[in-house]
Amino acid sequence: MALLEIRDLSVRFGRFQAVSGVDMTVEAGEIVGVVGESGSGKSVTSLAVMGLIDAPGKVTAKSMAFDGRDLLALSAKARRRLLGRDIAMIFQEPMTSLNPSYTVGFQIEEVLAIHGLKDRRKRRERAVELLEMVGIPDAGRRLSSFPHQLSGGMNQRVMIAMSVALDPRLLIADEPTTALDVTIQAQILRLLVDLQRQKGMGLVFITHDLGVLAEIADRVIVMYAGEVVEMATTADLFARPAHPYTAALLNALPDRAVVEAKVTGWRGRLPAIPGVVPGPFDRPAGCLLQPRCAFADERCVAVHPDLLPGGNGAVRCHRPLMPDGQPGPDRMEVPA
Amino acid sequence: MLSSFLRRLATAIPSLIGVIIVTFLLTRVLPGDTAAYFAGPAATPEAIEEIRVKLGLDKSIPEQFVDYVGALVQGDLGSSLTTGQPVIQDIIDRLPASAELTLFGLFIAIAVAVPLGILAAVRQGSWIDHLCRIVATAGVSLPVFFTGLLLVYVFYYILGWAPAPLGRLDVFAFPPDPITGFLLIDCVLVGDWETLGSALAQLAVPSATLAIFALAPITRITRASMLSVLSSEFVRTARASGLSPFKVIVGYAFRNAMLPVITTLGMVFSFLLGANVLVEKVFAWPGIGSYAVEALIASDYAPVQGFVLAMAIMYVVLNLLIDLLYGVIDPRVRIEG
């Protein structure tokens, strides 16, 4: 049984469909990368798993099961009991994600306290232990620091300590390194992966940086405009992207472009994907990527493609790319 | 901590010097001849002149100022011409009445406005949010003297629930010997529950008048501040850690939403000091507001100066308290040292 199994998850805010028909499974001990541009529904998906979508947002799903328990059927209280203990989350902005009015020690101990660790001394000891585990020097004294007295990287370490405080089985990291500078990014990434291995957690790693996923993820889910457009193992996805969007994202990686430029002697602008992710009022008919896709034809404009097995996993495209990078034959005859 | 406190205290001194100068000059440029008023309508020019000399009003303005400051340093605020008492004594007698009224009004306002603002933010768009908006609009649109008269009309004249708006105590009730000057506290100290009830009944309508006036800004700021904090990332973190909604709202969000509310409280308190003057008139409240108005009408300088000075000192002390509170609430404001 998968640790997290989501079938057909949709989130809408009024008339805006932020996430539609997302399927996702996460096994224990696995790192699943979720990648996409801003506005592709990555964060909303994870907030829906946490149950943190507030009215007027509306979450529906065929099933959303954590360890076999349907999250949507649980009472608010029962669901809260899972949060922080079995499912934890790390956010993007370490400087603003901690409460400025309380010491970091207080905030870590609070999580321990609400999930049943009543003994004050034990809480203190555990908090010191956690800070040491995430590599904060002089942990005992740091507990009485306020978030504004620590750097961004330190605060993110505190966030990580807080999230793994109760050894959760699933950790969702929503762009945990985006707000940090590059040297710190690598440290935090290493820390997260080490902790994940040690504890055998399932880790959902949300990012817009494919380069990061290449290093750590077992599988990658590519999202675009609230839909999953491609799923594959990391190696396959990087070697042979089947969706034009995935291919374009890979081409836009500066590293790749630089290597290519060295080979071909090409000089000019880095490749980019023209246009922006459609918002609530400009969703195109047919395929959502169609206005930005180099290979779009009439059928892409008219018919919305389904997510079907293909490529190296599943892909949402009428004519998935072949290993040579060119669109293959139309999948019209594939039964829906 | 102590040295930063003292430093903060020292910054209040220039404001106080400024207040002393301005009030002195202001009372001197006001129209009306004190000597003539004091001497009465039938006085001869010689008699008026004699009084002028006696009061020191024949000297030049700088000389009068030096006299005034000299007396002030010795704690002498001059004597009121109308009551014949030293101003300092009048203020000491009357200040508790005003303070009791203002503080009680402010207390009611906070007790209603803060929960209302929090609920309005938590249940945005619900009926309680609309109620909050109505209260805020009504509170700023209705002048204090009008709400005062309206409440007297409804609760005393029509419904007969409130006693006659004639001061701090029913004419048949006997006040306890003053200990603190605060009637409510004195009653409790002496254990005179009957007088306490009577005093509370007298206090209810005027303090409600002030409370309605103070409600609006406090509710509005509480709501706005809570809304911005509730959408902040650390609130999301708290919820993601499995904290209960109550704990998130009261323990995490409200604490961070308090700074603007405290700032507003300070401002509201100073508005209330001004509104007091009108409310005391409407309810025949023997406070320093009505005392100052009467003195002003009579061109009686000393009480007006004393009143403004007392207000300024209260205001400075209040701001000092608010600054210190900031540091208690938000560690980022705390002065390190």
Image (cartoon, coloured by chain):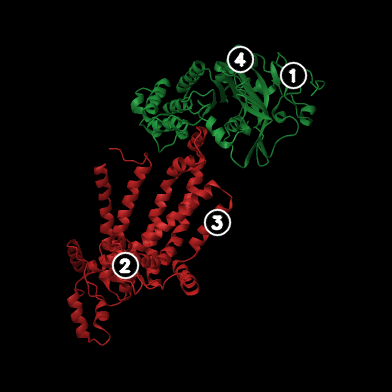
Chain the render paints green? A
Marks 3, 4: nearer the viewer: 3
Calculate the distance from the C-alpha at mark 2 to the C-alpha at mark 1: 88 Å
- Does residue A242 appear in the picture of this structure? no
Q: Residue B169 in the image: x percent, y percent?
A: 35, 70
- Pointer 2 indicates a residue of which chain? B
Q: Residues within 10 Å of mark 1 (few under 14, many from 20)?
A: some
Q: Of label 4 and label 1, which has the lower sequence position?
A: 4
Q: Same subunit under labels 3 and 4?
A: no
Q: Mark 3 lies on which chain?
A: B
Counting from the top left corner in percent of width and height, residue B88 is at: 23, 66
Both labels 4 and 2 in a single chain: no
Q: Badge 3: few (under 14), some or many (20 or more) residues near its Cα, within 10 Å?
A: few
How far apart are labels 4 and 2 at the CA level?
84 Å
Residue B131: give its label.
Answer: 3
x and y percentages locating residue B293 in the rendered image: 34, 71
Q: Mark 4 points at which residue?
A: A260
Which residue is the extreme one toward the top?
Answer: A263
Q: What element carries label 3?
A: helix
Q: Mark 1 lies on which chain?
A: A
Looking at the rendered structure, the secondary structure element under dot 2 is: helix
- The kind of residue tagged 4 is Glu
Q: Residue at x 38, y 26 (%)?
A: A122
For the residue marked with disc 2, what is the amino acid? Ile
**Colour of the chain lettered B:** red
Q: Name the residue under label 1.
A: A327
Residue type (three-letter) at the residue carrying disc 3:
Leu
Residue tagged 2: B288
User: x, y percentage for residue B55?
Assistant: 19, 75
